[in-house]
Amino acid sequence: MATEKEMKLLVEAMKAGLIMPDKIQEGLDIQKSLSEQGKNVPILNILVKKSFLSRKAAECMVLDHKLSSAEEGGGFQPIKGYTIQKVLGKGGVARVFLAEKKADGTPVALKIMHPLQNLNDLFVERFVNEARLLKQFDSEFIVQGLDYGESNHLYYLAMEVLEGESVQDRLDRQKILDEDTALYIIVQVAKALEYCQGQGILHRDIKPDNIMITRQGEVKLCDLGFAKPIEGSAGEEDTTCGTPQYISPEQARGFSDVDIRADIYSLGATLYHMAVGDVPFGGDDSMEVMAKQILEDLSTKNRNISMHMQYFLEKMMAKEREIRYQSARELIEDIESQIKGKKTLVFDPERAGEDYSTEESLFSVPGRKAKEASAPKARGRSKSDRRGRRDKGPAIDFFKGGKRRRR
């Protein structure tokens, strides 16, 4: 009879589409018959011998089970030179562990691709490409890759440890981010995209899950699994990739000539999610969402956002690529100049004369405390002068779009 461990392996194999349920049942029947004859044969051996399952798939299944034991705190140490301490997260492509480099004790985030992904050459290519790029890149706005390779038939990537949370985590908790914070995040990611653009690389999967905010307020772009050269051509199976809720119309159409403007569209969809509290286009399945990305107009009216925010969103998410920002630098300069102009128009006696040359003076930086404003000095003013200033009425803040709905 199949053991509990074997049954777990069979369930995973079936979920991964490696074997059909009827073939599993046939293998179990054979195993039961052999057991009645006093022969204890592992179920995977039977499935491989009957050609119901490839040998490589069986080996990957066993390896995946061992990696799961490491995830649960077992003693299995799969990557040479690293000691796994605990699991940090698990996604569709890989597990991420907090680990320590044995040579010098450096803490790392160790990303290990699921063994079953080894069966798909495209997934392996994407993982290795991401690892190579992160190791090669040198930008404060992109997570740093430290080491990558293959160990015990496992592909791994060691990265810097980021203490904080993803933008998606923050949205799950807060629902909506204030406009200053949202735009600060967008500008930092745009700087990451500017660096990628300079390296001739397109990200192709900008979304809240792939943006980290550290406890110090740093913003880092992560996950370059879908990245490709801007001038390169994608294979037929690799043209429509990304996350449907944030994908650009040209990606949804399967165009191979995508460029930085596709990433700018996805960044606009991310900004929309932060400012409004929901994705721009929803649907029951991926095909419906992608159809809306192509056909439906973006709705920014009655969303309790400022006119500035409406402008940024409509320009970043224009269906026609020619209308969008044509580069990450153009996007950065427009956002910063618009905010600077807005803050200059709003009279604030405590910030009179400030040149707004730093990001702290333009944005609300997440994780950083605002500078304490000095108390207004009444000395040298008459009571009538101070009353006269108040009588002029409140300054108009063109960047605020009214009260936000409570959700």
Image: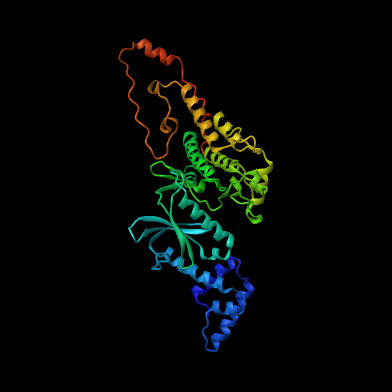
Give left or right: position of 15 versus 374. right
- Looking at the picture, the colour scheme in use is rainbow
The x, y position of residue 269, in whole percent, is 57, 41
Answer whether residue 172 is visible to the viewer in this image.
yes
- Residue lying at 44% horizontally and 46% vertically, measured from the top left: 138
Looking at the image, residue 265 sits to the left or right of residue 66; the answer is right
Between 50 and 12, the one lying in front of the other is: 50
Q: Position of residue 321 (x, y in %)?
A: 64, 38
Residue 271 found in image quarter:
top right
Compared across the picture, whether 370 is left or right of 345 comes to left
Counting labels gives 0
Can residue 8 be seen in this snapshot? no
With 314 as the anchor, is 370 left or right in this view?
A: left
| Residue nearest the observer in this picture, 167 or 132 | 132
Q: Position of residue 126 (x, y in %)?
A: 55, 56
Q: Residue at x 59, y 73 (%)?
A: 54
Q: Is residue 377 above or below residue 271?
A: above
Q: Which residue is at a point 54% across and 53% down the rendered structure image? A: 225
- Most extreme residue toward the right is 295
Residue lying farthest to the bottom in this orientation: 37
| In the image, residue 245 above or below residue 31 | above
- The image shows residue 17, relative to residue 354, as above or below, that is below
How far across and down, in percent of the image, does residue 323 sit? 64, 34
Q: Which residue sits at x=48%, y=65%?
A: 154
